[in-house]
Structure formats: structure tokens, C-alpha cells
Image (cartoon, rainbow, N blue to C red):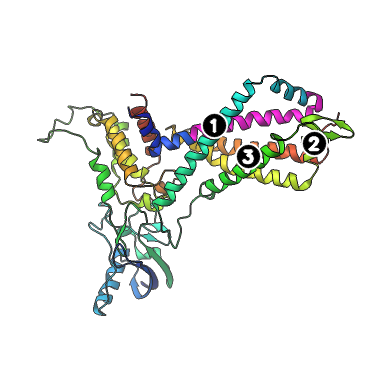
Amino acid sequence: MSDKINLTLNVWRQKSPKSAGKFEAYDVKNVDVNSSFLEMIDVLNEDLTKKGQDPIEFDHDCREGICGTCGAMVNGRPHGPLKNTTLCQLHMREFKNNETITIEPFRSTSLPIVKDLVVDRSAFDNIIKSGGFISAKTGSGQDANAILIPKPDADDAFNSAQCIGCSACVAACPNASAMLFVAAKVNHLAKLPQGQAERKSRVKSMVLAMDKSGFGNCSNAYECEAACPKGISVANIAAMNKDFMKAGIFS
Amino acid sequence: MLPIKQYFASSIGKKQIAALTGLMLSAFVVIHLLENFLLFKGPDVFNAWVNTLQSTKPFLYVIEFGLLGIFLLHLFTTFKIVVENKRARKKGYREEVATKILVKIMPISGTALLIFIIFHLIDFRFTNHHGAASIVMGEDLGLYGLVYNYFQNIFRVIGYCIGLAALGCHLSHAIQSVFQTFGIFSEKYNHLIKKTSVGLATGLMLGFSAIAILIYLGFAPTA
């Protein structure tokens, strides 16, 4: 049984946000099947550095699948072929010996490429800044039973809260829409009593901030849900549509 | 509350306009199919219904202009949506995300439908309902005769069926989409919504096409 595989990588190389960029092919030999996808690029990068070439730039932080920093298109799928898995938690055992892998950055006008596989997710931060929080005095934690939350609501809120803002939804969407991200953030707070005070203003300002950033419109292709490493459901989008309508027209 | 202009300029607002106008147009198409079934009742019954509609003028014009308005609003809104969507990703992927084909071709099926509707209106609405084209076996059968003669040509039948295929493709995604856009989502009933959408779209496509084919095959009475 072989624990090592050989691969050909077609990687998008782009020096700066404005430069044109192109695909470059790399042959990587003896890749340990137990290494993660990012570790595989680490090894290649060491090699490139030793040769005096520019290493492939990519974003990462925790490498535990919980921070939402990593992410790239692997063979036409955000975060690669494994469902509910971030790129850092994807392991090379998912690939075959002598396979050719295409690695591209997440592409959208609103999240522009900084370099190689790194994209600027400031547009997401701006959406959160516009209302993705509750205005409450911080201090010591309240008594756990001071605010009662029904279990199904807590579960729903938690499911939405799992969004790590990695932007795979935008990358997967044929229209580069950010609806799943925004909907997850809106619903996380809309499901909890603490979120009610600003519920209406929140959904309005977050949707308008999303539009202002230039993301596309949702056409219900549901590719976002299929690509989401946290399995966020498009039910969030339906709920946000309803909330936006309530807040925008009927209040 | 948002200013009405701002609401309908938002991404969700635009989609709700597209969904609502689309739903109204779909309702018209359903009524249109039911009317077309009258063709099999023979020229007298069909033309009597046509005359009933004509007798409601000028109210009929109000309905027609209303439909035109809804249609143009649908066209304008969806066009804006498509332009914005293209702008949101200027450079595509080398390896495309495998999007469901019917969703991907919504603008194409929509454009095909637009072209079909223009020809359809020229052929049946903005033409003389009496005269040479309406004569079947020496008798002027009015709009009935026009339809009857039109579908004696196999190429017109094929062209008509292609137009209806575009309708089927467009509506099978569109109808279920309306529910999502207005926030109607339920794990329990979603499969039903989806089946109804595909079923209704297929039903409309097959219904209209069958009428054209049956007329071509001589199943429509001539007296």
C-alpha cells in the first residue's frame, strides 16, 4: 500500500490585485496522503522558496476548520470535494495518484484577489459592521436562566451561528451572491430574544450593505448550501427574505 | 419601513417583483391553456368564447395593457438582475461550479420565451382574425380557422413546441423559486413545492404542445 502520491497542480498565480494572473503547473512528488491540503502546499512552497521562486500565497489561520480564513476552489468546488469540510481539513487521501488538481481563488468582484489564492473579505466585515451584532452593555455573564430560550430556537440560532464567513457561498454561487452568509448572520440573532430589539433595523441595513458591496442577486440555485463547509441551510435565506419584507414594507 | 423606491431597488425587493410578476404571468398562461382546450369543442364553441371576450371591450384592453405592463416589469427587473449578476463575477472559473442546468439557463430560456411570445403575438393577436388564413374547407371559421390552418404546417408545430419547451424550462425553476423568494420554506413541504413546480411547468408545456400536435394530426373538428 502506497502512502505517497504524485500530483500535478494547476495553480492560479497572480502577483497583485491589478495584474493579469495565469495558471501555472507544478509537479509535486511523494505527497503524504495523511497530510492536509494546506500542508501539501506548504511542502511545495518550501520547495519553491529553496529554488528562489515566489511561494504560492494562501490564507489560513486555525487549520481546524473553525476560523473561516482558508478556502480556494479545488477542481471547481469551494474547499474541495469533501462535503461539510474546509480546505484545511481536506486531506490528500481524497485524491488519486497522478491526479491533476486545479486550484483557483474564490472569484467575485466584491471580494477581490489580493495575491494568488488570497482574497480580500473586507466586504463581509462591512456587512457585519452595518448591523450584525446586538447593542448591549458588556459585563459579567448573566444568570443562565435569566432569559429562557426554547431548545428548538436555540438549536436554530446555533445552526446559523456556525457560519464562519469563509465566503465559499459567494464563490459557489453562479451570481456571486452573498445571501447565505448574510442570512446566516441575520437569523442567528433573529432567533434569539437578545436580537429582537434591533431585528428590523438589522435585516434592512445588512441587506442594503450587501447590495452596496456589489454582490450578485440570489437566483435560488442553492449551490451555496452545497458548498458551505458548515452546512448552513438555504432556509436561512427564505427566513431573511420574509424578515426583510416584514421590516421593509409592513412596519 | 423603507422608502418604497429603496425597497424595490434592493436585491430582495427586485427578486420579489420578478417573482410576483412572473406568478401573475403564469396564472395567465394557465387560463390561456384552459381556453385553448375549447378548440376541441369545435369552431362554434371556440369562436363564441372569442366573441364573448371581444364583447367586453374596452375592458379587454385594460386587461391586455395590464398584462403588457406586468410583462415589461418582469422583463426590466430580470434584465437588471442578470446584468448585476454578471457584474458580480467578471472573471469566471477555469473549472466551473456545476450549477443546476435549468437555473443556469433561466436568462436563456427567458429570452427564448420573449422571442417566442413576440412571434406568437404577431401570428395570432396582431393579425386579421377573418379572411384567407381563416378559411377551412371553403368556410371562414374566424380565429378558430386561423389556429387550425396555422398548425397544418409541421414546421410551425415544431417551432411552437420549442417555444413551449422554453416555457417548461423557465417555469419549472421559476414557480418553486417564488416560494423561497417570499420566505415560504418548510422542510416538510418543500419536496411538494418542488414537485408542483416541475409538474405544473411540464403540464403547461405538454398541454399546449399536445393541442398543436393534435390539430396537425387532424383531431380538431372542422364543423
Q: Quadrant of residue B71?
A: top right
* Left or right relative to B34: residue A242: left
The type of residue carrying mark 3 is Thr
Bounds of the magenta segment: B19-45
Q: CA distance from mark 2 to mark 3?
A: 24 Å
Identify the subunit bearing mark 2. B
Query: Against B144, is A42 above or below?
Result: below
Query: Against A4, is A145 above or below?
Result: above
Q: What residue is pinned by disc 2?
A: B148
In the rendered structure, does residue A17 fall within the stretch colored magenta?
Answer: no
In this view of the protein, which residue sits in the foreground, A114 or B126?
Answer: B126
Q: Secondary structure at mark 1?
A: helix
The type of residue carrying mark 2 is Tyr
Query: Against B16, is A28 above or below?
Result: below
Residue B93 % position (x, y): 43, 60
Q: Residues within 10 Å of mark 2 (few under 14, many from 20)?
A: many
In this view of the protein, which residue sits in the foreground, A156 or B143?
Answer: B143
* Left or right relative to A140: residue A178: right
The type of residue carrying mark 1 is Gly
Identify the subunit bearing mark 1. B
Q: Secondary structure at mark 3?
A: helix
